Image (cartoon, rainbow, N blue to C red):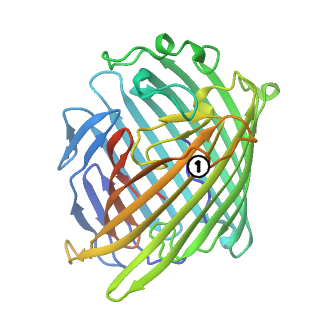
Amino acid sequence: MTGGRPTPARRARSGWAGVLVVLVAATPGHAGRSFIPIPEIILDPNEGTTLGVLPVVLFEFFPRFRLFSYPTPTRRWSLIAGKSTTKDERYIANFTERSLWEGRAYVVAGLLHERDSTRRFFGLGNSSNEARESNYTDNDTVAEASPGLWLMPHVALGYDMRIRRHSIEHGQVTSLPFIEKEHPEIRDRGDAPAVYWSHRVSLTYDSRDSIDIPARGALATAYTEAADRTLGSATSFVKLGAEWRDFVPVFIRRVRGVLALRALLNYVSGSRDTPFWEQSSLGERDLRAFGTDRFIDFNRSAASVEFRVPVYSRRLFGVNPELELAPFFDAGEVFHRIDDSPVSDLHVAYGMGFRFVVRPQVVAYVDIGFGFEGSAVFSGVSYPF
């Protein structure tokens, strides 16, 4: 729900790229603008099926406008706007500049307003029951600013300030009970409107050869974050966490690919009234056989591995798009106490990813995952990690 964490400036070919609903644009070098139409098909466990057709309308469910711009190798901005015929809506604006102060500083900023009437809640804990699925409308508004300073070529110190207002109301999935009816235990734990002003300090190591399409290198981040009643937040909490990603080039006979690895560990220390939507969760990009926030508790651990292999490339519309296959495996769990084992009761997901890559910056993905509750399909822009 918050904007991306800082990553270092990288040398890259000059170009511009954009996505306008189902229209992707990219420019190699200083060549003229080129357009690559790609259909958008979203099969989300919560929102259902969304079909996209050129030029600008996603038919039936959720018309959406998307524009991603890369005016320089170190600067980018994006706009996303969508409004359903009922109550759902999503508006996102992001900006990144990685070459401030002659490349020694950066800033990432973002605004988000989202109203999603298809959100699901199954209960708290790693063993939450699928049979207790409930529905609600998630109203979320977030403003975030993240400046940072490069201490060494690959090491950065970052600060993140986030202001968030959140509330819930009845959803539109009439076949499911309302969250407060099915789960009365969440009363005073995120059911009331609340505002949070949180502050995060992070230390990042980044040796990747590319921010968007890495083929080698590592990214590691450790952070601490806090919100406090005395500073205007509804409740107080402290978050601690670390994440590591590694990208290893692999050459096996004629097969050339990238082995992508990720591991993370997050802790939240707070009182019982810490809202469920500020706790740790697993689902979607972290556990690709389950919907968003399928498992929720104070703490979480997760790990993923996928092998990205280019299988087809053809010059099209002035660029060289590639199709990648990416078999993947995810594992993770949420847990309540800080001294609980982070690997004692792991959920797993496995499947196949399909990636449409236009170098140096554009990636669209479709991931099909399988787990003990069935299958799920997700799509989006950029790699899952």
| Residue at image location 25% in from the left, 52% down from the top | 22
Determine whether the residue tagged by mark 1 lies in a helix, strand or loop: strand
Query: Residue 204 appears at what percent x and percent y?
Result: 69, 63
Three-letter amino acid code at disc 1?
Ala
Between 20 and 332, the residue placed more toward the observer is 332
Instruction: Specify the farthest residue to the front.
Output: 344
Query: Eyeballing the image, is 351 above or below 9?
Result: above
Q: Is residue 319 visible?
A: no
Measuring from the top left, give residue 326's x and y in whole percent.
Answer: 36, 65
Q: Name the residue under label 1.
A: 109
Out of 106 and 244, give the one closest to the viewer.
244
Q: Is residue 187 visible?
A: yes
Residue 134: percent from left, percent from top: 42, 21
In the rendered image, which quarter is residue 187 located in?
A: top right
Q: Counting other residues with Cα less than 10 Å from the Cα at mark 1, is it few (<14), some (14-19), or many (20 or more)?
A: many
180 or 107: nearer the viewer: 180
Q: Is residue 198 left or right of residue 68?
A: right
Asked where in the image residue 13 lies, by quadrant, the reply is bottom left
Near-viewer residue (104 or 362): 362
Give the quarter of the image for residue 277: top right
Q: Which residue is drawn at 46% across and 72% down?
A: 259
Tell me: residue 218, above or below residue 243. Answer: below
Residue 238, image x, y percentages = 76, 38
Drawn side of residue 283 relative to residue 238, left or right: left
